Image (cartoon, rainbow, N blue to C red):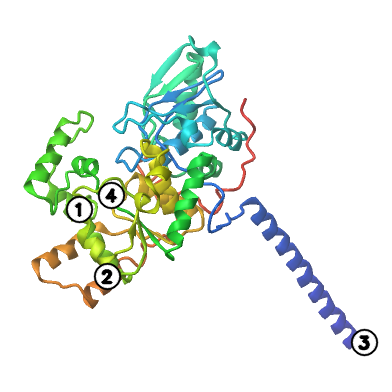
Amino acid sequence: MQRLRWRTLGLLRRLLSCAIGSIGLVAVLYAHVRLFPSSPVPKLPDSYKLPMHQEIGLGGEQSWMLEVAPPHLSRAPLPARKICDMVAVAHIINATLVIPELDKRSFWQDTSNFSDVFDDNHFISSLANDVKVIKKLPKELATSTRAVKHFRSWSGIEYYQDEIASMWEDYQVIRAAKSDSRLANNNLPPDIQKLRCRACYEALRFSPHIEAMGKWLVDRMRSYGPYIALHLRYEKDMLAFSGCTHDLSPEEADELKTIRENTVYWKVKDIDSTEQRAKGYCPLTPKEVGIFLTALGFPSSTPIYIAAGEIYGGDSRMANLQSRYPLLMNKEKLASAEELGPFINHASQMAALDYIVSVESDIFIPSFSGNMARAVEGHRRFLGHRKTISPDRKALVHLFDKLEQGTLKEGKKLSARIIEIHKRRQGSPRKRKGPISGTKGMDSSRSCCCHCCSSRSQNVHIS
């Protein structure tokens, strides 16, 4: 009897120990989730944010500026990288950030101001715990000592803490001559990585009139059912810059070459189009995109939103894709000229509308991994790894050439090959990898730490 009592008591002790351990584990997990909460993914978020090309200044006791071009769907430096990096750098060197002025001298001649595209008050308030942001450089600093500085590409945090921060001893205003890819992607403190994500995907909120129009376009696309947003990067400026002339006439190829030769700030003039394409450096043509979508199994009834500017070659170049997928839509088809009137002459605002519809799509597919494509893909990862299919252009070109040569036909064999190639190219979660600190890396918007970015940092407010 005594032995039974001891056994019972021992069992109760073990149960009590397990219960206490379980309570402790739940407490630890709860604290962890509170510290690094996941971002909810509603179907239509209340706000949209567009990483953007812009002019940035840092004001207050210490300030800096940089000049860049407005986006549209351009081949200029990645906008997400610019704004993420510069906000992070401002935090690192204890500087005050001046609201950017958009470059009105660019290729697109866009007269938009920062507040026309973004909610500047939200930008200021959302970064208040990390970086002090002001709307204008104070008058007392108008004649202060200034420096124009080319920040070193892909620099680690030590470069800014040591070399750049030391410039405050001699200057009160620092103008950053270049802003793209100025900060390394890897081996940075977690709070800096989180700040970069918040700057891109929380701080930059579109102005109310853009948000409203963007949501309205999304609703109209949804009326057709689940839809694909296709970033069809096949505008004249893109083809001229990249030297990609596959499937173009000799006259069209000559026109693009002339544009490239006459554009002073495009440094590379002699480009081998065949070599570019073989390496996967050219955007897919509209015809190739149609073959790709068909091989993936999308039915002809699939609604597709075309996020792009004016397609080079117009309707004739779109004919094959249009015949495969009749429900090809864009801003101009979804909205009237009157509805688009406030945006039509502002490339950055038109791009913002495409960005919204792309982020909210059921599937996003870019024909080229340029700035817009990477920004949208990064945002969709941040919102919960929404499906993004990234074409393997190098592999696809090899298959498309076989089709042209007649050694391969469209059908089950081609479809199986293309599906196999893209099994792991659909935006699913993956482990962050990259080069060592301070070396060149790629796709910073793809590799920001999406799961924990939305948690507010505990950094001291900078005045």
Mark 2 to mark 4 CA distance (whole Å): 20 Å
The residue at which mark 1 appears reads as 279
Query: Which label's residue is closer to the chain start, 3 or 1?
Result: 3
The residue at which mark 2 appears reads as 295
Name the image quarter holding residue 404.
bottom left
- Tag 1: residue type? Lys
Residue at image position (29%, 52%) is 232
Q: Is residue 409 above or below residue 199?
A: below
**Does the image show residue 396?**
no
Q: Residues within 10 Å of mark 3 (few under 14, many from 20)?
A: few
Mark 3 to mark 2 CA distance (whole Å): 76 Å
Residue at image position (51%, 43%) is 193
Residue 309 is situated, as x and y percent measured from the top left of the image, at 30, 45
Residue 190 is situated, as x and y percent measured from the top left of the image, at 54, 44
Q: Nearer the viewer, mark 3 or mark 1?
A: 1
The residue at which mark 4 appears reads as 233
Query: Which label's residue is closer to the chain start, 4 or 3?
Result: 3
Q: Nearer the viewer, mark 3 or mark 2?
A: 2
The residue at which mark 3 appears reads as 2
